[in-house]
Amino acid sequence: MKRAGFTTVWLPVALLLPQLMIIAIFFYWPAAWAVQSSFYLQDPFGFGSTFVGLENYTDLMTNVEYAKVARFTVIYTVLVTFFSLALALLLAVKADTVIRGAKSYRTLLMWVYAIAPPVAGFMGLMFFDQRNGPLTEMFQAFGWEFRLGADFNSTATAMVIVAVWKQIPVNFIFFLSGLQSIPKAVREAALIDNRSATGRFWDVTFPLLAPTAFFLLIINITYALFDTFGIVDTLVRSEPGNNPVTLVYKVFVDGFRGNDLGGSSAQSVILMILVLVLTVFQFRLIERRIHYT
Amino acid sequence: MTFWKIAALNAAVAISGTAAWAETEITLWHAMGGQLGETVNTIAEDFNASQDDYKITPVFKGSYEETLTAGIAAFRAGEQPNIMQVFDAGAATVIGAKGATIPVQDLLTENGVDFDINDYISGVRYFYADSDGKMIGMPFNSSSPIMYFNEDALAKAGVSAPKTWEEFQSVTAPALKDAGYIALSQSHLPWIFTENFMSRHNLPFATNDNGYGGAEGTKILVNNDAIKAHFTALTEWKENGLFEWYGTGWGDNATPFEEGEVAMWIGSSGSFGGLMKKDLGFDFSATVLPYWEAVTTEPKQTFIGGASLFAMSGHDAAENEAAARFFQYLTSPEVQYFWHKETGYVPITEAAYELAKSDGHYDRFPAAEVGIQQLSLPGGENTKGYRMGFYVQIRDVMNREYGRVLSGETSVEDAFANIEKEANDLLARFAKTQG
């Protein structure tokens, strides 16, 4: 068999060059710059700069508050990922069985996807308003003194709810198309073997959805870690105070509000390493165990 | 041929035109949104209309923090504006970066504008000055925390505005509670109950002459008994329904006052203009910040909040001259009085204050004078200001710990120990950035 290929080395290199340049300029160069400045403490205006080695990192590691922010970020990520996947799956399974008006029902569920995170945050501000937010009143009716902005747990709850609400449509679209790609023959065969709908779901449908679910798991973790920035910023109104923040938000607060470039760079390097670990985990550990059809 | 003739003529006109009526254009980056921004635009337009040599363009850059960050990024790229507004908490950052700005005092004298620091009201003279007393930034929108009160509520409770916190605690607040009000809220704990608490009671806020002596070795002195007693009192008042805290947001704490639930609110003297324009449904007035008689019997003036204007370096002489002329225009009594009247920020010169008085502004609005009266109270060795690096982050730490105290997550003792430690770590880090 004859393989089609390039006769010279230069043509493929030339064709790849634009892509490589974009990656280098927009990804590697800023990343390298962040790594470099994480070893310095510098004057914001760029006059003085002191090489401090790993001090920015050791300061972070010994900082009790940084540990608290990290702990909150983990809890937040777990909650957002779990609830947005679980609720989207439930909705997708139910939508899959709808026969009449299926299209409009699905479209309605997808609409929220078009809302930008800061806008979602603003809607959250209105729903959870201290004085006349409907959800605040609902929580208070259940006896919880819910106070957005003044109480840590209240703000944390609002953040999780808004972030989950915003993410459900994405997951819903993927789960629904995943469900619809399961062959009818398999479902019918399962129907003969098992009469319980719940049993059929866990034994047949769910394993066949696994590739989709795994893909979404990674997407949702990165969403909760990084993309909820806009939601966090609007809900704390750029003044975190005693409210919870995520690690990415802390990079912003220290770097852009506080002008501590070295410390902020060290924090972003830590996040880069986190993403690296997540990617390795994705490709090495789980891909092997999940079979794509 | 005709075409080329016209083109040549046009070019000639264009060249001679720019030569004959060359306006020096300069830019001002500021953080004044809404009504305040429109007032800045009016001042700029009036300045442009008042002469033909200079043209200033104000650009709104977002919040104070965003404006500072934008200015820093622009400076590093060599694209800095001629004038940048920097707020009180960012003063150490911009003044510490020697070479980033031209001291406003030098700028004015080099361009033939008379400058005498004693023309300025005493409270604003040295806040943005260096350790030798040279003015670096031009105080622009200067304000001070003052206590607004609902006159109807106080009349109903049969009390007058308290002069001391002792009076508030034993007389005013219980009476207001009986009359169905929450006695007090405030909008900015680090500014009102920390920085100005120190100034009002003439307590040192930091070593090294409140930080003016340089970043090296400066330590915060926030962990003292007077302020801890104040925060302990706040938590007790909150428990007894005499004080309420609605979170870190400025507006969250102001709204209950505007809606008549809270009888007294401590905000900025610059809030006056906004409150006047709202239809509150009750009469309000204002008074100076109370003090603890147990701490001092001679209360002093407070620090100015708000922001000042810095002339950025790296521009040619013509543009610097334009900036100097704009500062001259801005500090003229008429413009200062206009700014004061429209916004509630204090007039920064004695002459402007006199003009406001002689025009009868304070007869019409007595509350408008409270801010400047408070800034003109006797000063002490600790009242000229403070200079601490990474202060935006230090304020964030304070807000976090105070929030925890008031939501019952931590004790006053632990909170102040934390603030002291974290602030000193940040100050030490800042000192290294200056190396």
Image: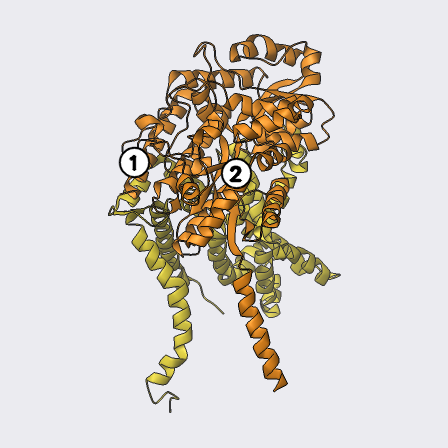
Instruction: Identify which amino acid the numbered label 2 is placed on.
Output: Ala
Locate the C terminus of chain B by quadrant.
top left
Residue A125 horizontal/vertical position (percent): 61, 41
Residue A157 horizontal/vertical position (percent): 55, 38
Q: Secondary structure at mark 1?
A: helix
Depth check: give the residue in front, A204 or A81: A81
Locate the N terminus of chain B by quadrant.
bottom right
Depth check: give the residue in front, A228 or A290: A228
Figure check: B107 above or below B407: below
Q: Is residue A109 left or right of residue B229?
A: right
Mark 2, Cα crowd under 10 Å, few <14 / some 14-19 / many 20+, is: some
Q: Which residue is mark 1?
A: B428
Q: Nearer the viewer, mark 2 or mark 1?
A: 1
Disc 1 is attached to a residue of which chain?
A: B
Q: Is residue A228 visible?
A: no
Q: Is residue A209 visible?
A: yes
Determine the CA span between mark 2 and mark 1: 32 Å
Residue A267 horizontal/vertical position (percent): 36, 47
Report which quarter residue B214 is drawn in: top left
Q: Which residue is mark 2?
A: A156
Instruction: Identify which amino acid the numbered label 1 is placed on.
Output: Ala
Identify the colour of chain B in the image: orange
- Callouts 2 and 1 close, C-beta under 8 Å: no
Q: Is residue A79 left or right of residue A277?
A: right
Identify the colour of chain A in the image: yellow
Q: Residue furthest bottom?
A: A2
Residue A249 horizontal/vertical position (percent): 46, 45
Mark 1, Cα crowd under 10 Å, few <14 / some 14-19 / many 20+, is: some
Report which quarter residue A282 is drawn in: bottom left
Disc 2 is attached to a residue of which chain?
A: A
Depth check: give the residue in front, B143 or A217: B143
Q: Secondary structure at mark 2?
A: helix
